[in-house]
Amino acid sequence: MLKIDSLSKTYANGVHALNGVTLDIPRGMFGLLGPNGAGKSSLMRTLATLQEADSGSATLSIPGESPIDVLRDKDAVRRRLGYLPQDFGVYPKVSALDLLEHFAVLKGLTQRGQRREVVDGLLQQVNLWDARKRKLGTYSGGMRQRFGIAQALLGDPRLVIVDEPTAGLDPEERNRFLNLLAAIGENVAVILSTHIVEDVTDLCPTMAIMNKGQVLLTGRPTDAIEALQQQVWRKQVDPSELADHEARYTVLSSRLVGGRPVIHVHSASDPGDGFAPVAPDLEDVYFQRLRLQARARAA
Amino acid sequence: MTLDFFRFELREQLRSPLLWLFAALFALLAFGAASSDAVQIGGGSGNVHSNAPTVVASMLGIFTLLGMLVSTLFVSNALLRDFELGTAELIFASPIKRRHYLAGRIGAALVSGLLVYVLIAVGILVAQFMPWVDAERLGPINWAGYAWTFAVVVIPNLLFTTALLSLLAVTTRSILWVYIGVVGYFVLYGVSAALLRDIDNTWIAVLTEPLGMRALSRTIRYWSTEERNSGIPELAGYLLANRVLWLTVAAALFAATFALFRTERSGSGRRRWGRGQAAASADPAPLRPATTALPRVTPVFSTGTAWRQFLRQVRFDTRGVLRSVPFIVLLVLGLANFLPSALFRQTLYGTSIWPVTSQMIMALQGAFSWLLIIIVLFFAGELVWKERGARINEVNDAMPVPNWVPLLAKFVALLAVIACFQAAGALAAMAVQLVKGYTHLEPLLYLRSLALDSVVYVLMGGLALVLQVLTNNKFFGYALLIVVMIGQGVLGMLDYTQNIYNFGSWPIAPYSDMNGYGHFLTGQLAFQGYWALFLLALMCLASAFWVRGVSQGLRQRLALAGRRLRGPTGAMAALAAVAFIAVGGWLYWSTNIRNDFLSPDQQLDLQARYERELSKYRNLPQPRIIAVDNRVDLHPETQSMVIDANWTIRNTHAAPIQEVHVATADDKQLVAVDLGGQTLSMHDADLGYRIYRLATPLQPGEERRIHFRVVQQPHGITADQAPSNIVDNGSFFNSRVLPSFGYNEGVEISDRNERRKRDLGEPRRMPKLEDEAARANNYVTNDADWLDFRSTICTAPDQVALAPGYLQHETTVNGRRCFSYAMDRPMLNFYAYLSARWEVRRARYKDIPIEVYFDPAHGYNVDRMIDAVQKSLAYYEANFTPYQHRQVRIIEFPGYQRFAQSFANTIPYSESIGFIADLRDPDKVDYVFYVTAHEVAHQWWAHQVIGANVQGATVLSESLSQYSALMVMEQEYGRQHMRQFLKRELDGYLSGRGGEAIEELPLERVENQQYIHYQKGSLVFYRLREEIGEEALNRALKRFLQDKGYQQPPYTTSRELLSYLRAETPADRQQLVTDLFEKMTFYDNRVLAASARKRADGRYDVTLDLHASKQYADGRGKETAGTMDDWVEIGVFANGPSGKEHDQKVLYLQRHHITTGEPKITVTVDARPDEAGFDPYNKLIDRVSEDNRRKVTM
């Protein structure tokens, strides 16, 4: 539905925010995974018409409509776009209902009756109906994010871009939010950018991993996990051994269990040395791709 | 600990570039004010040295007010920085004491503030060493003055302002609120200034002003030039009370600051847009997946969509502003400032006026609307940064809204905010009108006037938006705006005063109830349109630069703007720019080529050339006009006229006149000249001076008929306000539109500094009293003595035209209404023409008809005027000589000027001084009665007796008219009311002399100095009347009138008047006449103690310890002791029912002969005394009038 081809962007300070990004984003949820500073937000902003790209192209194809050149025909994109930026704020003294009404008009819902219907429906859908008359300043982080998704869904968008929506939410809020995302219709392409692996695991049939402006992997999470079968090994080590292991193996991750580090390493064959095989998950895929990139760069 | 905080904070403050920036800016401003006249802050006037200690003190005092804006920065920085940066929790979690922290921080803020004032003082100090500073205007450096100023003014004020700001900062923890507090303080400061207008409230006004500026100015109000130059005010009285009070308040504020300072996090919530960290309450939503289907409504985009989006954005932004705290605060402050100024609006003598709409609009302009400048500038920044401030910009920017919508919406939101603010003002004004019982509401006039007034705010707000967008940095945008505003001032200083290059300036159309905006509006609208086009072009440009999405550096912005400009925006920008240039070109052509434009400096240079080249003709004998027959063809509809002046002239000199020098104010207007055969031998059109050589010289005694034709016609828009003498309704012009003969000294520059700059030497003064030659002319004109006058004036068919004399006949010629007037006896060469649509009210005094011509809406005081005319005629005919004319006419003219003026049997009277006075309060001065009596008195004093053109001439016209009017007033209102009036006269005289530009002179030598011939004149003649009696004084005046009335040259003088007065003055009061007229005499009379003792017979002996002294001052106020040999009233009073002065019972009031400095006087009274007084009614000129009375102790 959205085809991105060789998109590049270099900032004035020399940072390559996007480096030949090529992606094919189908309908449904698409997870964009990457650490902080991977270029996710640059990509999102570029797709949301808020930033210019240096080169490359992006085309939005909606069935039954002529394809839209995302980089040139910004107005057309904006009419089909729902965007929830990373870390967005609100006017604290305005009620949710008023602000959503306001955004609805800006989205082009200029007919009062229609607008009412849409706004009320959305407020119910995001479970803010009871709190609709409260000032946004009194909303919790999760409520605010749900308000954010409500505004992004105004005007029947075909492309919904959600940038790091779950950062800073508590588990309950996060679940609630993800449920909401999952309920968005099937005709819509939803790009969910995140650095939280579970978000993607839980929700996205397709995904991409990005770092340093480059796409490291794109495809279905299950395929990626499948490809790592029998290559991830686990071992609990003494903290004093950690540095030694890091030097000797491709350590994917290290986390404390009962105060002692448990490490995952990537190895095509059994490394022995007390390592036990472990079923890979998306997190292992993610770290493996990052390590791979780091090694390629070092080389 | 405190010291550590102090040191740390001071280092931070001193590192702040803002401190140095503001210090440098203020020091520069102070330097500019002290070294040139272009910047005016406090400053000295006239003869007061520009480095005199009083000048330094008031200048630094004003800076302590301005400095509050900077102190706010220091204080809020020092106290709020930790909360702003979020370091508060780090600091307060450590074991420190709050008071150490506060004391250290506040101490550092104080020291940095003091540093700024020291730099300002340095700026003032070094100014005097600048080579361009006129050494004549400097005195020696007075170090004690600086020390005094810092000790008494600067440091206490710094303490107070810092205390106030600290408390605000500590309690609100918001810089915004601190600033709002400061604005509020400024407005309250202005409001309390209104109190001072009524001099009875001096103590209140002085004490309520925290910076002591009023206390200072009250203390030195009556100081002479000499005292102002060297004296340092004593720390006593007003000043001491004020300083003690406000230092106490400062201490209390500091105490409250320490008590209320909280380090806890609660309440540190900085509730500003976008940072809403307010407590999040529990989420009521249950944990369940949403199942309802999304309503699927796909928006349809049409041309209407964009407009609806635009309107929505306007509504949203406008509502945001209207509901914001700063707007509400400013609105409330504006109303708080406006209401008292509208309720207590007064023009003269503390008497209120009817709240007619035009006056309410003036009050709105002065006290309310100007706040809009703060509002538009502030909210322009807020609106441009609204989305980004709330971090919601990315949502907004990704909305399907055309690029032109946001900026235009924000501009229109500003318009809506301006409209709402002005509408609130108009509603408040109408409420005031209703409260005051005025029911003629004119909402449409409000609409029109406030709309016209709002244009400047719209333009400034638009410019602020543009600058915010272009700079893309809020504070840089504000800074640039300030630079633009300073630039406007600098242009003016550099003599670039034309509206064409001053953004947002235009010739302001004055409003008059009689004439509306009249023809003045054209010029204003043209210039407003011109600047609107400029703004339009800028707005288009800004719209191209509007940041949407993430801004990525200048280069990309430029590239993007270039792309956006390649559309309709660019076309509109180009169109607006072309239209701006075209309108500008057309305005330049109209103002500078079709019409003449002279900048202020060019005008002065021209005057200098006039003096240099032509003053050699000063005493050249010229013919005198002996008869005038003017035919005036007036067209008020087109503001034009043609005057055919047919005059008879006579050579009154001993030698033949070969050359006639003809001077005009505007040479182009003089289109035809016939002097009975003449050739033009010199013509300087710029100076308006021509010399004609007569074909046949005018022989001594020969008379000749001559003719001038003068044409006045507007030529489109002028650079300055269009001429106001011929207007659609209410034309008023006098004989000055016609040529005069010979060199006119009135053209010379009188300002000493401007003269010095042009090497012109000392300004010309009035000829000395002893100058016998100067007595050949009267002081009104040197073109004529007494002349025969007749005129025909034709005007619009619906108007009446008036001129001195009596109506001979009225005809209609070519559809014009023509009136012929003739005077039946010789009169001065001083006449005026008026034409308007009036209502007329008629009355009589004996057989003399009285007519008042007034605007139908201004009938309030017409009967009062008629009454005043009748009573004046009665008094003057009974006590002086008969009225020389057969009619009195009072004629209202538009308020473009504020005076009443007496021509022969014709008194034009400005609509703004008497016609709308509200005389319903009987306790207020009825100045309508008084002014009318004064103007009627001029029919004697000026139109019967006219002084020679020497010193003291205005005693014979103005001072005697003052005296005459006082007598009529006293008959009408009683002696009690006179005291109220004379107190104002005393105040006017004493404060007027401090601003004297040349030198103060005794009354008999007054050189047209208003505070002498009006204010002192009243006091002098009233006292003389008190001491020699009304009958004796009037006898002298009557004889003087009989002897000198209609006198041919040499004209009479004040010296001659004095001899008539002395003839009626008993021998023991001759010294009094000398003191009053020939010297400048000041008394210092006081009751030191007053005690009473009950006598056996039930009466009381009251003993008064008095202090009496008399001083003689010279022209600069230097005083020498005189000998007390005066008759001064001693009074003893009993308490009345109200305890106020006006119903006190007089137990004793006698004049005593005082010859010693410390007299002790005992008098016996019948009832229990309450108060005793030495000159209790302040009939003597005494600078401290309060100490003339004292409570009696038993």
Image (tube, rainbow, N blue to C red):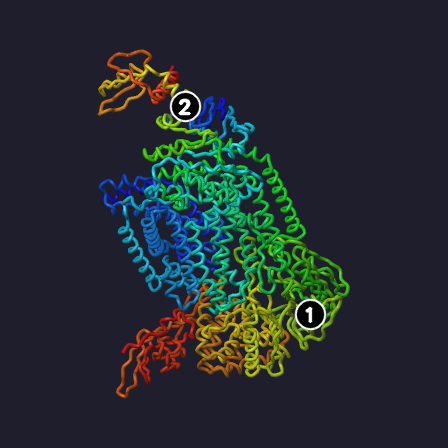
Residue B903, given in percent of the width and then of the height, sits at 61, 72
Residue contact at pointers 1 and 2, CB within 8 angstroms: no
Chain on which label 1 sits? B
Distance from the alpha carbon under mark 1 to that under mark 2:
102 Å
Q: Which quadrant would residue B674 be assigned to in this image?
A: bottom right
B270 sits to left or right of B435:
left
Above or below, B115 relative to B369? above
Which of pointers 1 and 2 indicates the residue nearer the eye?
2
On whether disc 1 and disc 2 are found on a single subunit, the reply is no
Residue B651, given in percent of the width and then of the height, sits at 70, 70
Chain on which label 2 sits? A
Amino acid type, mark 2: Met
Q: What count of labels does the image hold?
A: 2
**Secondary element at tag 1:** strand
Q: Residue B701 or B302: which is nearer the viewer?
A: B302
For the point 55% across and 62% down, the residue is B442
Q: Do we see residue B1055 in this rendering?
A: no
Amino acid type, mark 1: Ile
Q: Which quadrant of the figure contains the C terminus of chain B?
A: bottom left
Q: Badge 2 is on which residue? A: A210
Above or below, A73 relative to B71? above
Q: Identify the residue at the far front of this view.
A: B292
Q: Residue A289 or B1085: which is nearer the viewer?
A: A289
Q: Badge 1 is on which residue? A: B625
A30 sits to left or right of B844:
left
For the point 62% across and 46% down, the residue is B584
For the point 23% across and 43% down, the residue is B96
**Secondary element at tag 2:** strand
Q: Residue A220 or B1188: which is nearer the viewer?
A: A220
Label 2, residues with CA under 10 Å away: few <14, some 14-19, many ≥20: many
Q: Residue B810 or B998: which is nearer the viewer?
A: B810
B877 sits to left or right of A239:
right
